[in-house]
Image (cartoon, rainbow, N blue to C red):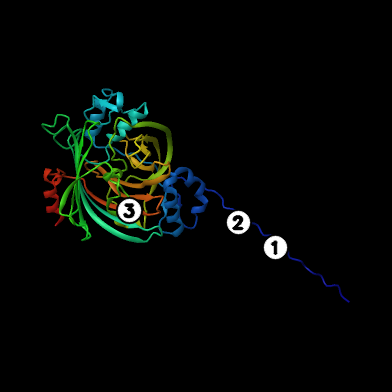
Amino acid sequence: MKNISMVVVVFILIPLVLVAEEIKPGRIIKKENYQNYLSDLKRLVPSSQFKNIAHGLQRGWITMPIVEKRNYYPPKGFVRATSKNGGKCKIMPVNKLIGWEAGLPFPDPKTPVELAWDTYRRRQMAEDLEIYFKYLLFTKEINMERSFTLSLWKKFWVGRTDIPPIPELPGNNGVLNSKESIVIKNPYDVKGFSMVRIRYEDIERVDEVYSYIPALRRIRRLTGSDVCDPMLGSDQIYDDFECWRQKIDPKMTFNILGVRDFLVPRHYTNKPSQRFMKKNCFQVEWEMRPLWILVIFTNDSDYAYSRRILYIEKTDKTCSLYGGDFYDQKGRLWRNVGPIIQASDPETLFRCWWGVLIADHISGHSSTAYMSPKLRNILVPLDVFTIKGLLKRAK
């Protein structure tokens, strides 16, 4: 009987090991390879934004092209004002700033309160601004449940550097800081809702906020708690406008957690296409930038947040914001603003936001806003800061 040779084939199962790859210019992170970059993404993206970005990559809604860091420039008048006034400002007790006229009060901040005032006086919009918003509201399952559109106007009375009159509107004498207004254009059930916010330079004088409610046909003055309510069912409160609209007050304290490189959406110099909105994510290019991390303690148990953490541009002398994390009075992460998509007009160098995500980490809801600002030939008329003027524009 012939010997039968038996060949035993042994299959050795080798577990698939993901090889971490470095995030650097030229890479494109996408659905097929995003897990290779997870360790870097967790380190380079604010933790509050990570879940949203990873979800968009996993679903294939977005890719993340990584580009070289670029230099961006603020408006020329703002640069001149910062250079002219640098070193003239001082911080007095209870967070009071003196000696400021325009530009950044502290070109090289040395203390947390100096950085806070730089961020408060930041240049992230023109001093006369007209902007159109479209809000999309998403459920926890990322299904769009509602949308609305609004127009916003803002005008600074002080600190003007590029649009005459400079540096202050005549007759103001340091009283008003700015006025801001919104009017809802649609849908029909909230069309005509209007709000006017008046801010004073004195940090101990609270904002005056008035709204017109079409269903009641009444004008009412909003209280401090009202401006902490979500705007028309979105995930944004009025003090979250531009990430940090809350006024510096005597109770606040501040802390700098340091400077660190973060992966952020690149700053565009032309209008991004509306196609960059993908569900509640953004299809944009990303770059590495060093950002200050500033903590603001409100020290006010009646306020919505116990503290804010802001991510602040360090290199271009604008103190623009790339995002913020907001914690409730129990210390829980409640909301975050970011990613933020910015662009500058190539002629005026006026900059503005073009897109932003606002996420509620307790409810799981999120809202995105697509914006279309006017960045040339701007001079906001004063009647938009009256309810009558706003209602004319709501028709």
Measured as percent of width and height from the top left, residue 216 is found at: 17, 55
Quadrant placement of the N terminus: bottom right
Residue sitting at x 30%, y 26%: 94
Q: Which residue is mark 2?
A: 16
- Left or right: 323 in relation to 373: right
Q: Label 2 to label 1, Cα distance in Å?
A: 15 Å
In the depicted view, which residue is nearer to us: 137 or 161?
137
Where on the picture, by quarter, is residue 225?
top left
Of the two numbered discs 3 and 2 in the rendering, the one whose residue sits closer to the viewer: 3
Q: Which residue is mark 3?
A: 368
Measured as percent of width and height from the top left, residue 75 is found at: 24, 37
Measured as percent of width and height from the top left, residue 142 is found at: 39, 59
Q: Is residue 215 above or below residue 174?
A: below
Measured as percent of width and height from the top left, residue 152 is found at: 21, 48
Residue sitting at x 36%, y 41%: 305
Residue sitting at x 30%, y 30%: 250
Of the two numbered discs 1 and 3 in the rendering, the one whose residue sits closer to the viewer: 3
- Left or right: 222 in relation to 328: left
Residue 311: mark: none
Residue sitting at x 27%, y 27%: 96
User: Quick one: label 3 or label 2, which is nearer the N terminus?
Assistant: 2
Looking at the rendered structure, the kind of residue marked 1 is: Phe
Residue 20 appearing in the image: yes
| Label 3: how many Cα within 10 Å (few below 14, some 14–19, many 20+) | many
Q: Which residue is mark 1?
A: 11
Per the image, label 3 sits on a secondary structure element best described as: strand
Where on the picture, by quarter, is residue 190?
bottom left
Q: Is residue 272 above or below residue 301?
A: below
